[in-house]
Amino acid sequence: MIVAGLGFSSTATVDSLRAAFAAAASNHPVSALATVADKEGHAALAEFAAVTALPLHFIAPADLAGQRTLTCSPRSRASYGTGSVAEASALAAAGSGARLLSPRQISDDRLATCAIAIGGQK
């Protein structure tokens, strides 16, 4: 399974998510989206998931903390105990043995990030 993990600000728009996804997912056949569970109900996320028609997995914050990421955002580290919500979400959703295909990509407006992981079993 190939998962696109998303991290984003509460002010992110569908365009923010689309831009980060496009930068990260080019050349990867993404089969699912993932983000931290406290983003459930975010209007832009719901719209983006509907447009992509990909299943959306919500990851418990505690499951992000143990993920090893390629990048480190001080805000993500303080809030979730991981360097990147996008990277950690992708890894957690992709399952045991997952690995990142590249570091997170950031939307031009800097409101969203996306990382792609390929993994084992979920």
Image (cartoon, helix red, strand yellow):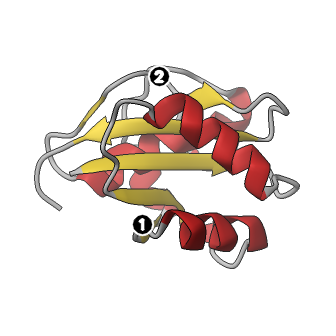
Check contact, mark 1 vs mark 2: CB within 8 A.
no
Left or right? Give the position of 67 relative to 12: left
- Circle 1 or circle 2, nearest the eye: 1
> At which x and y percent is residue 91?
33, 44
Q: Marks 1 and 2, how far apart in space? A: 21 Å
Left or right? Give the position of 3 relative to 9: left
Left or right? Give the position of 11 relative to 113: right
SS assignment at label 1: loop
Q: Is residue 77 among the parts visible in the rendering? A: yes
- Above or below, comparing residue 40 to residue 113 in the picture: below
SS assignment at label 2: loop
Q: Who's the residue at 47% across and 22% down the image?
A: 103
Q: Amino acid at mark 2?
A: Pro
Mark nearer the N terminus (1 vs 2): 1
- Above or below, comparing residue 10 to residue 53 in the picture: above
Q: Who's the residue at 80% across and 41% down the image?
A: 111
Q: Who's the residue at 65% across and 73% down the image?
A: 46
The number of callouts visible is 2
> At which x and y percent is residue 88?
44, 42
The residue that mark 1 highlights is: 54
- Above or below, comparing residue 44 to residue 25 in the picture: below
Q: Is residue 84 among the parts visible in the rendering? A: no
> At which x and y percent is residue 25?
45, 36
Kindly indicate the quadrant of the structure image that contains residue 32: bottom left
- Which label was assigned to residue 103? 2
